[in-house]
Image (cartoon, rainbow, N blue to C red):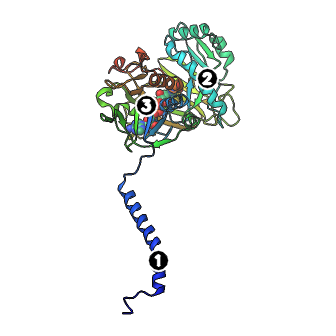
Amino acid sequence: MADSVPTRRALLTGLAAAPIAAAAAAERKERRSKKRKPPRPTVQHVDVAIVGAGVFGAWTAWHLLRAGKSVRLFDAYGAGHVRASSGGESRVIRMGYGADTIYSQMARESLKYWKDLSDSASAPIFHNSGVLWFAPQGDAYTAQSLAWLQANGVGHEHGDVRWLQDKYRQMQFYQGETGILETETGALIAGRGVQEVIADAGIGVERVVMPAPLFSKKTKRHALPDGGTADNLVYCAGPWLAELFPQQLANRIVATRQEVYHFGAPQGDTRFAPPELPVWADNANGGIFYGIPDIEGAGFKIAIDRHGPRIDPDTMERTLSAEGIAEARTYMARRFPGLASAPLVGGRVCQYENSSNGDYLIDRFPGQERVWLVGGGSGHGFKNGPAVGKRVAAHILDANLAVEPRFTLATKGTTAARTVF
Ligand SMILES: Cc1cc2nc3c(=O)[nH]c(=O)nc-3n(C[C@H](O)[C@H](O)[C@H](O)COP(=O)(O)OP(=O)(O)OC[C@H]3O[C@@H](n4cnc5c(N)ncnc54)[C@H](O)[C@@H]3O)c2cc1C
């Protein structure tokens, strides 16, 4: 019958369609098999995963990448963000540290890295304004700092109250005060500085809230939330460290509320900006008042190095207190009379992440050879980011390198923290 006998045309189209049908079937099969396979993680395995892209995490990544290691860098909010301890406008870098010469050496080493970074950045990260430290005559910290600067050939000047008053006429000094001007140091740009370190390292920041370590006994690697793995984990979580590791760090790393204020000098008045005014720190009033001259148009910055109440860095309201502003104004009227009625032009509420003795924490997580806890900047960590990162990288490159006793977890007590700045 005509229906059952294929015509020549039908035969021809059938023949032509055969390979197309086969190709479509193959394509469907491939699509199905693709569907069954789980998605491959972007990165399967790295040498080191770093949690926290503040100044410590950023410089750790920088040094490890320079040493040829593969690295992933994670941060819950991104690099140098507004809630991080490393956020905001500026930080002091000085070398005088009294008898704590370990920090003098770290600052000296770090300055080199900050300067190199600053030289290649599109805008400066380091401002060589100098740092003026003053205190009553006979202050042991000042004498020890001076001795270290002298012994190490670091640029400085020093003198008595006459020298201070002649040099800085926009400030008011008082009988019996002495001072040291470090000439090689100054101020660092904070949040933008951290972002610049990361850009220079050539790494991206993955915005992920990371958990405490997940170790796979089968692969003997640390598992990452997206299925990737890492040989080493470094937690540079700043004020969040104790939240991640409450058993080990509760009351050992304590986040406290800190305020900084920016006041505006009158139009055309250059006395409160470099080169006329350096970074300054006053050790004459019980608590330490310190400040940064008007850099990058941010205004004259003043802060008090005294620990505020404990806070949660995620949920803290960041509004300046009226008492804090008043305390800063009272101080300025006495020490910087030209700013007595200057308007508040900015400010910031952030937090210190204090250890009990002000020493940093750079140690292994107890019982875990390849998990590192790095933090406890205690109000003086920013300047030393490069040296801290270098030390952490050195530990990862050489498992036998001894941990500096002052940076061990064992030395971090639960007593009230001391201020350092
Ligand atoms: C007001 C003020 C003034 C200061 N002045 C000076 C100064 O003059 N000189 C100086 O040297 N130092 C100073 N410091 C101290 C210095 O800024 C800090 O010690 C330093 O920035 C701490 O860096 P960090 O990397 O440890 O922490 P952070 O910068 O807070 O970085 C930690 C990062 O970890 C991330 N993180 C936390 N938990 C997780 C998680 N579970 N998953 C993913 N990411 C996570 C956070 O988002 C954050 O970005 C000052 C600090 C303050 C607040």
Q: Which residue matches tag 1?
A: 15
User: Badge 3 is on which residue?
Assistant: 236
Of badges 1 and 3, nearer the viewer stands 1
Question: Residue 299, percent across and down?
Answer: 61, 35
Kindly state the secondary structure of the residue where label 2 is placed.
helix
The residue furthest right is: 268
Residue 420, percent across and down?
47, 20
Q: Which amino acid does label 1 sit on?
A: Leu
Which residue is at a point 40% across and 32% down the rendered structure image?
A: 231
Residue under numbered circle 2: 112
For label 3, the SS is loop
Which mark sits nearer the N-terminus, 3 or 2? 2
Which of label 1 and label 2 is nearer to you? 1
Q: How many marks overall?
A: 3
Q: Is mark 1 on a helix, strand or loop?
A: helix
Q: Earlier in the sequence, mark 1 or mark 3?
A: 1
Is residue 329 shown to the viewer in this render?
Answer: no
- The vertical placement of 88 against 93, above or below, is below
**Height in image: 52 above or below 106?**
below
Circle 2 residues within 10 Å: few <14, some 14–19, many ≥20: few
